[in-house]
Image (cartoon, rainbow, N blue to C red):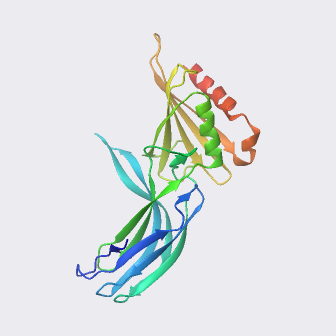
Amino acid sequence: MFKKLLAAAGVGGAEVETELFTHGVQPGGIVEGVIRLRGGNVAQDISRIAVEFVTRVEQEYEDHEGHRDTGFGWTAVHGPLHLPVGAPLEFRFGARAPMETPITFYNGRQLPGTQVALRTVVEIQGAVDAADTDPIGVGALPAQHVLLEAVERLGFPLRSADVEAGRIRNSAQQLPFYQEIEFGGSHNYPQLNQLEVTFIAAEHGMSVVLEADKRGTWYSEGSDVFDALWVDYAALGHRDWAGELHHRLAGMISRR
């Protein structure tokens, strides 16, 4: 459906429509589509046309938490142009999803709490910028799938996922936010209330950050415990990842 662009005078603006040819993608993949402009009753000068990915990010403030839609992975589609009265124009594009794009699907299931969309931005001289947003699905990378499946094999049930503003310390993180995938407690690890997993994916491998809520005892308070491991995509099938995670979790439990 075409959406109105505001003309400088507030009336007679052009319209924009974005059609996606790719409705699902993995991090690092390409989303293809076409942007259609249709001139209105007045000619308009457009500064540039671009697309970007958007996700809802949780932001902590001094006295509360909030959410905001945050753009990332900006791709320029076309530079300045003049849109005549009633003129139809089309622009094909291919936008690469950054490797750290939050995933929304794993093992055929949607991850509750995370949404990603592609937003078309049309910057118009003398008027309000226009945007058209289309949701897309982001599937887990093979390495992410293997690690998440290993966590579930250890008895941790998948609960939800969210995207948080900030940076993971001592990581090669590129985006200003990261995704946390939350699992409930496992009967195999009664010392842990829950487990959160964060992926910092890159071209040839990814960092996997583990954060567990450790229960308190009669002689110690509960605490958050952390660990991280590196997954080389080329060596993905040569390791027992459930065994590796069990080893890591045992070490986290034993910390004081």
Answer above or below: position of 250 versus 207.
above
Residue situated in front as seen by the camera: 159 or 178: 159
At 51% from the left edge and 55% from the top edge, which residue is drawn? 137
The number of numbered discs placed on residues in the rendered structure image is 0
Q: Which residue is more in the foreground, 160 or 198? A: 160
What quarter of the picture does the C terminus occupy?
Answer: top right
Q: Residue at x 57, y 27 (%)?
A: 155
Seen in the image, is 85 located left or right of residue 54?
left
Q: Vertical placement of 157 versus 84: above or below?
A: above
Q: Position of residue 23 (x, y in %)?
A: 52, 61
> Which picture quadrant has residue 150?
top right
Q: Quadrant of residue 83?
A: bottom left
Q: Position of residue 34 (x, y in %)?
A: 49, 74
Residue at the image point whose x is 41% and y is 73% from the top? 17
Q: Residue 240: horizontal and vertical position, in percent?
A: 72, 34
Q: Nearer the viewer, residue 108 or 246?
A: 108
Against 44, residue 250 (above or below) is above
The answer to whether residue 255 shows anywhere in this view is no
Q: Is residue 210 left or right of residue 72?
A: right
Work out which quarter of the rendered image holds the N terminus and state it. Answer: bottom left
Q: Residue at x 53, y 48 (%)?
A: 105
Can the viewer see residue 132 in this picture?
yes
Place of residue 99 in the rendered image (x, y in percent of width and height, measured from the top left): 58, 54
